[in-house]
Image (cartoon, rainbow, N blue to C red):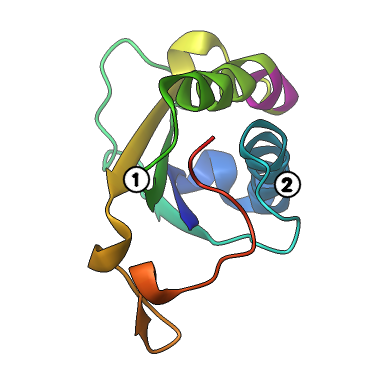
Amino acid sequence: MVQVKIYGTRTVWEMKREDISDAIHRAVVGAWGLPEDKRFHRFLLLEDGDLVAPQRSDAYLVIEVVCFTGRSREAKRALIAAMFDDVAPFLGLAADDLEVVILESPPESWGIRGKSGDELALGYRVDV
């Protein structure tokens, strides 16, 4: 299971949500083999002044990838590389203006479709 939270400034990113979502989804599908139809993105766009990031531009973007535990170190590095090699250039971001955080929690800590996450049959692997 993967959910993505995107934090940025509303004045910069509001009109680019679809581009951001598409770029991130391509990265997750490519790096982790997530099925095309598994897209869960939450935009948390903030007003000017509500995202304090010294030495970053107004375009500063934070991407949190919330997922089940189990992915290898190599898989995490591949996703981070895809974010900086593909997503950042597509969005016109300098490396200093993108931050990626992968937050993992065990499947039993999730509740999905009326079940605990460890009871689900996902149809894709999370241990790559």
Q: Are marks 2 and 1 in contact (CB under 8 Å)?
A: no
Number of numbered labels in the structure image? 2
Which stretch is magenta?
86-90
Dot 2 or dot 1: first in sequence order is 2
| 124 vs 11, nearest the viewer | 124
For the point 38% across and 51% down, the residue is 68
| 12 vs 116, nearest the viewer | 116
Quadrant in the rendering for residue 92: top right
What secondary structure predominates along the stretch shown in magenta?
Answer: helix
Q: Is residue 118 above or below residue 105?
A: below
Residue at the disc numbered 2: 22
Q: Position of residue 79 (x, y in %)?
A: 56, 27
Q: Is residue 42 above or below residue 72?
A: below
For the point 73% across and 46% down, the residue is 22
Mark 2 vs mark 1: in front: 1
Q: Quadrant of the C terminus?
A: top right
**Which residue occupies the extreme bottom position in the image?**
114
> Is residue 50 found left or right of 99 in the rendered image?
left
Q: Position of residue 112 (x, y in %)?
A: 41, 78
Q: Position of residue 37 (x, y in %)?
A: 73, 64
For the point 74% across and 25% down, the residue is 90
Residue at the disc numbered 1: 69
Find out whether residue 50 is within the magenta segment: no
Q: Position of residue 85 (x, y in %)?
A: 66, 14
For the point 36% across and 32% down, the residue is 101
Q: Is residue 98 above or below residue 63?
A: above
Mark 2, other Cα within 10 Å: few <14 / some 14–19 / many ≥20: few
> Is residue 23 found left or right of 100 in the rendered image?
right
Residue 108 image label: none
Mark 1, other Cα within 10 Å: few <14 / some 14–19 / many ≥20: some
